[in-house]
Amino acid sequence: MSVCKAGDKIIMPRNVHRSAINALVVCGAVPVYLNPGIDKRLGIPLGMLYEDVEAAVLANPDAKAILVNNPTYYGICSDIVRLTKLAHEHNMFLLADEAHGTHFYFGEDLPVGAMRAGADFAAVSLHKTGGSLTQSSLLLCSERVNANYVRQVINLTQTTSGSYLLMSSLDLARRNLIRNGKEMFRKTIEYADYAREEINRAGGYYAFGRELINGRDIFAFDTTKLSVHTREMGLAGIEVYDILRDDYEIQIEFGDIGNILAIVSAGDRALEIERFLSALSEIKRLYAKSPVGLFDHEYINPQVERTPQEAFYAVKKSVSIAESVGGICGEFVMCYPPGIPILAPGERITAEIADYIAYCKEKGCFMTGTEDMNLENINILT
């Protein structure tokens, strides 16, 4: 909202968090979506190819900004230094969703933080990996940005009764990171690397890491993210997630249709890591089966027909998921976490998407975004 007004274009990957598309609904900016790369084995969306972004910039020279995930939920980073340079060469802003990147500024041997790469804005969720209280975060601004105007925009959306608990927790977390961040994240990376090595040695699962880096749509990898592929054992990630929670009292970050994500932090001890590894081993022994019939990817390229704002506020009708195929979606549909929309307002509902939604429900994913809380029906444009 600080760089885009109604009708302005913004170049962004489609695998953004729903909050980025919410902003388009509120301010009326028009997305120029880029489909991320897809890892065929893991079925996950990757980063942005420089060539794709450059083509979008040249085709949309009137765009105001480029938005980049730094990193994605899975820890995958695009070449943000080069993308920032591209944006500035074309008089555009570079915005970074750095919800999971707080530690980039304080650890060693980690991907570059967006502001160090020259970005104009970085939304940093300090509460995720920095230790502040939930709901507290920072918006970092470069000298190219009018911070006073940004403050006015923030006042349009935030409460006038700010929480001093949250604000003080930000300052305490910042102080702790400055003093102890290097040691905290060194320990974190050691634990995560050890867990990856042990999981891969045991077989069945695949804990992926830096070996994925290709210098293109996986330019860097956040090694604090312990992402584990489960589908080759015949289990959806959400199934492993549920078993870990219900049977072993281990709460991880999330599970999707093919992977689980455990975010290792400085608060973890060797005991927690060993319990996690033991639980995964036992789950494999008890539940492994043929992967035949499992979905092999979680990202489906969207068919965008209307802008998010136009579709969200359009006249709509509620129909069953089966009846919605061919219609234009008027609301969000997503698994949460990670909160990346399967459908966003303005996108065409295809048979593949309808099947994917049914599959996610069957596997027990927490589905949200629709007016119908049970996701039996979906709103489409009339």
Image (cartoon, rainbow, N blue to C red):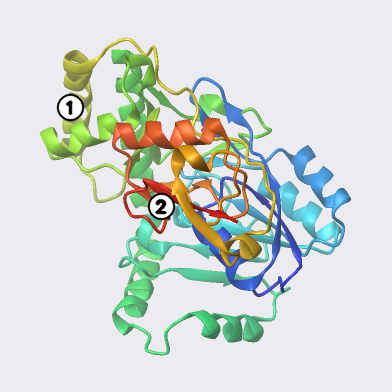
Q: Secondary structure at mark 1?
A: helix
The amino acid at mark 2 is: Lys
Q: Are marks 2 and 1 in contact (CB under 8 Å)?
A: no
Q: Is residue 242 above or below residue 98?
A: above
Earlier in the chain: of badge 2 and badge 1, it is 2
Quarter of the image for the N terminus: give it: bottom right
Please name the residue shown 36% across and 79% down the image. 167
Query: Where is residue 156 drawn, in percent x and y?
Result: 54, 84
Query: Residue at the spot x=56%, y=69% of the render?
Result: 140
Is 278 situated left or right of 197 in this image?
left
| Label 2 crowd bin: few (<14), some (14–19), many (20+), radius 10 Å | some
Task: Name which residue lies at 29% across and 79% down.
Answer: 165
Compared to 59, does 245 lie above or below? above
* Quadrant of the image occupied by residue 8: bottom right
**Residue pointed to by mark 2:** 182
The picture places residue 230, in percent across and down from the top left corner, at 35, 23
For badge 1, the amino acid type reads Ala
Few, some or many C-alpha atoms within 10 Å of disc 1 (few <14, some 14-19, many ≥20)?
Answer: some
What mark, if any, has residue 279 been given in the picture?
1
Residue 85 placement, left or right of 110: right
Q: Camera-side residue: 9 or 244?
A: 9
Q: Is residue 75 visible?
A: no
Q: What label does residue 171 carry, if any?
A: none
Q: Position of residue 160 (x, y in %)?
A: 42, 89
Q: Nearer the viewer, residue 31 or 96?
A: 31
Q: Secondary structure at mark 2?
A: helix
Q: Would residue 294 appear left or right of 219 to someone viewing this image? A: left
> In the image shown, does 246 or 356 lie closer to the viewer?
356
Judge depth for marks 2 and 1 and give the one in front.
1
